[in-house]
Image (tube, rainbow, N blue to C red):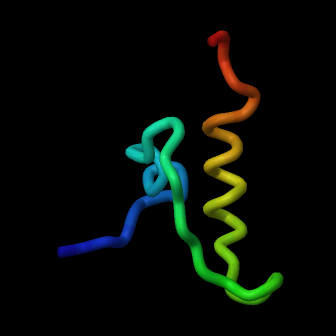
Amino acid sequence: MDKVMASAADAVADIPEGASLAVGGFGLCGIPVMFFAVLQEDRWPPGPA
């Protein structure tokens, strides 16, 4: 199974709104910075409720 995505946006595309996520890292070492940035771009600012 190939788990490599073409882009970070593709990697977060299937994460539903309100999902709980567990990510690893320690301080600023090993945290998925690109993941957080793309996830925020996709969800912020929130649309009309």
Residue 22, given in percent of the width and then of the height, sits at 54, 68
| 18 relative to 9, above or below | above
Q: Residue at x 64, y 51 (%)?
A: 38
Residue 47, given in percent of the width and then of the height, sits at 66, 17
| 45 relative to 39, above or below | above
| 25 relative to 19, above or below | below
Q: Residue at x 66, y 10 (%)?
A: 48
Q: Residue at x 67, y 64 (%)?
A: 34
| 31 relative to 6, above or below | below
Q: In which quarter of the image is residue 35?
A: bottom right
Rendered-image quadrant of the N terminus: bottom left
How many numbered discs? 0
Q: Which of the two residues, 27 or 1, is positioned nearer the viewer here? A: 27
Q: Which of the two residues, 28 or 1, is positioned nearer the viewer here? A: 28
Rendered-image quadrant of the C terminus: top right
**Of all residues shown, which one is farthest toward the left?**
1
Q: Is residue 9 left or right of residue 35?
A: left
Residue 24, given in percent of the width and then of the height, sits at 60, 80
**Of all residues shown, which one is farthest toward the right?**
28
Q: Which of the two residues, 17 or 38, is positioned nearer the viewer here? A: 17
